[in-house]
Image (cartoon, rainbow, N blue to C red):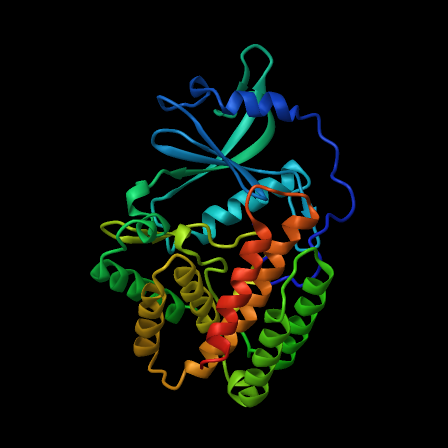
Amino acid sequence: MNSPRSSAPDQRIGGNDKTDIDEKRVAQFLRDPQSYPEPTSQVEVKETHLSCVYLTDDFVYKLKKALRYDYLDFSTPGARLRNCETEVAINSELAPEVYQGVVTLAEDQDAGLNLQGRGRALDYLVKMRRLPDDDNLEYQLAQNGPDPDKVSAAARRLARFYMSHAVDGPVRPESLQSDLEARVEELNSLPVDCGNDLSQLRDATLALLRDNWQVVGDRRLKDVHGDLRPQHVYLGPEPVFIDRLEFNARLRLMDPLEELSFFAMECERHGNRWVGERFIGVYLELAGETRAQPLIALYTGYRALLWAVLSARHLDRNDHRKPWADISREYLRLGLKTATNP
């Protein structure tokens, strides 16, 4: 995952502190079902921009990559340990009983690598209880769609989470404007053809910001999820939200309506915008807010530009795991659709 709010280019800075960890040996060890303390028939491996994730039958083990960017530092085992501890701590509210703790990958002189912490500590992993794939909202959006009652229950859970957090300063419209202009400039420098959608979305979003400058300035920041997408929502007997953005607390500070506007756009990308709209409606009702549509349009355009940039950055890294140019253009299209119809 990229930084969801940073407008700086996604570049490594400095050099990683050297360690004597043999990454290939560690990867081979973690792919082996015999390496885990619990019996498992197989190990499924998934890779993200920041982590390698190992899924056993009942648990998930997440190993941070040794990276350092302007907005995060995973460059040393100590930094990764602190990050793992933070991830477990901040996810306790929205995903109780899912995050099991931090596991130490160690090397014993006699028995070799192990996940029991025996011998010399090499690295650290977040351990999570594996949730049923069928409960995942992204999965359900791709099938017949989720149960409306379960969507409403999840929306109420998230709204109460927002309302339980103290206000942390005002939204600054001048910062939104600066970020927006920086994103447009960066997207123009990346190898993706945006056609006229980029300039139209820029103009529409800036117009919304100008027209609602004071309203935006009256909004308040809260410590939200930070990376709320359908893949992070599970609609089980009790709704669960995983993978809060842990590596930079500042990036989690935003108006809850901004986060929900982006979530609604993500649901629309998966063909079910009504799900995101249900989350917005429940939050507005519980918070006693009205006349939010211009803000939703503004925040959707703002976040669409951000994620168009984050998607296009993969092209600069020659990452061809997904059709990033198409995804970038899709964000622009969806942002423009909402920003021009507030």
Q: Nearer the viewer, residue 319 or 325?
A: 325
Q: Residue at x 26, y 52 (%)?
A: 144
Q: Nearer the viewer, residue 184 or 131?
A: 184
Q: Residue at x 31, y 69 (%)?
A: 278
The reply to whether residue 255 is in sight is no
Q: Count every numbered label the image shows and give the total.
A: 0
Where residue 214 appears, as percent x and y from the top left, is 55, 89
Q: Residue at x 74, y 61 (%)?
A: 189
Where residue 14 appears, as percent x and y from the top left, is 78, 46
The reply to whether residue 131 is in sight is yes
Q: Residue furthest right?
A: 14
Quarter of the image for residue 250 reads bottom right
Q: Residue at x 55, y 89 (%)?
A: 211
Q: Is residue 247 left or right of residue 236?
A: right
Q: Residue furthest top?
A: 110
Quarter of the image for residue 15 reads top right
